[in-house]
Image (cartoon, rainbow, N blue to C red):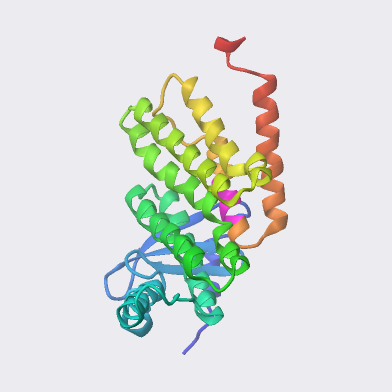
Amino acid sequence: MNLDISHLLDRWDYRPGEVMVRKIKGREGLTKLQLRVDLGILQMNVEGRPDGKRPNGFESYYDFLLRQLDEHVTQNGAGIAFRISPDSYTRLHLEALQYHHRYICLLQLEDHAGVERDCMRNLNVFDFVNRYAESPELAWSLRQFQPQSLMILTRARATPFLRKNRPGRAMDEIQSGIQMILDFYTEIERPDLRDTSMELESLQNWLEDLRHRPNSKKKPTRRESLELRLAEAVKNEDYELAAQVRDQLRTLKTTRNNNPPSSLR
């Protein structure tokens, strides 16, 4: 059996800096997602855990740990602390990455309900590790991605209102997302991260754009497309690409500040 997938890659060229995703029908007739990356193709299930596995018979490893937590409380009461081992934490981290890849794909495909489902799932994982990781440093290595997940969640919640020509509701969702990110930085007492947050800047700029956009039923802006690329580059640890995209975002901000909408001139 020939295992070489070059013929698949040759028919789907990789374009750097672009989120390239498609839906296909799997051998079982189930819909699957494929994400083109520089070295190949990532394939994911649309439902359940993205890789289709069921750790210890559960839908996800996170669900398995929730069961362990319930059993711990039943046996020991709430007085004896439950802790996530480093090995379990690593498995949670890798699993969260799978869901991240999927909600980036679903956002590109405008499956906003799916994006919200996966974002909320990862946000619950972040809260779980914050409560039960063996050390704050271990918890932070996942929680640092919380603002990014909140930003993507906000886009998934606000965009459908724009599609329905309800910009007021969309702006309410964006303001709510901004507040959730601000609350996060307040909770961890990191005003330095708040002041340099690309996620906050992204949502604040989107809000300003909507306030001066006469037609909310427009295709995603250049800024929105760049933000999606930045999220994927950071998660893939492609820091060179992430730096390039950040430069493009800053250039857009500078251009916008130097050329305000005619209504503000």
Task: Work out whether residue 3 or residue 42 is closer to the camera in this orientation and state it.
Answer: 42
Residues rendered magenta in the picture: 228-233
Observer able to see residue 37:
no
The structure residue drawn at horizontal position 36% and vertical position 64%, both measured from the top left corner, is 24
Q: Where is residue 141 in the image (x, y as percent from the top left)?
A: 60, 64
Rendering coords of residue 64 (x, y %) = 36, 77
* Residue drawn at the location 42% of the way across and 30% of the way down: 171
Q: Position of residue 236 (x, y in %)?
A: 60, 62
The C terminus lies in quadrant:
top right
Say whether residue 138 is left or right of residue 166: right
Residue 214: in sight, yes or no?
Answer: yes
Furthest-left residue in this view = 29
Count of numbered circles in the view:
0
- Residue 252 or 87: which is nearer the viewer? 87
**Which residue is nearer to you in this view: 249 or 207?**
207
229 in magenta: yes
Q: In this view, does 37 lie above or below 119?
A: below
* Quadrant in which residue 219 is drawn: top left
> Residue 181's x, y, as percent?
52, 44
> Is 91 in front, or is 44?
91
Residue 244 among those drawn in magenta: no
Provide the major secondary structure of the magenta segment.
helix
Q: Which residue lies furthest to the bottom in this view?
A: 1
Tell me: residue 116, above or below residue 57.
Answer: above
Residue drawn at (65%, 43%), measured in percent from left and top?
191
162 over 188 or under it: above or below:
above
Where, by quadrant of the figure, is residue 214 drawn? top left
In the visual, does 141 lie left or right of 129?
right
At 70% from the left edge and 57% from the top edge, which residue is drawn?
239
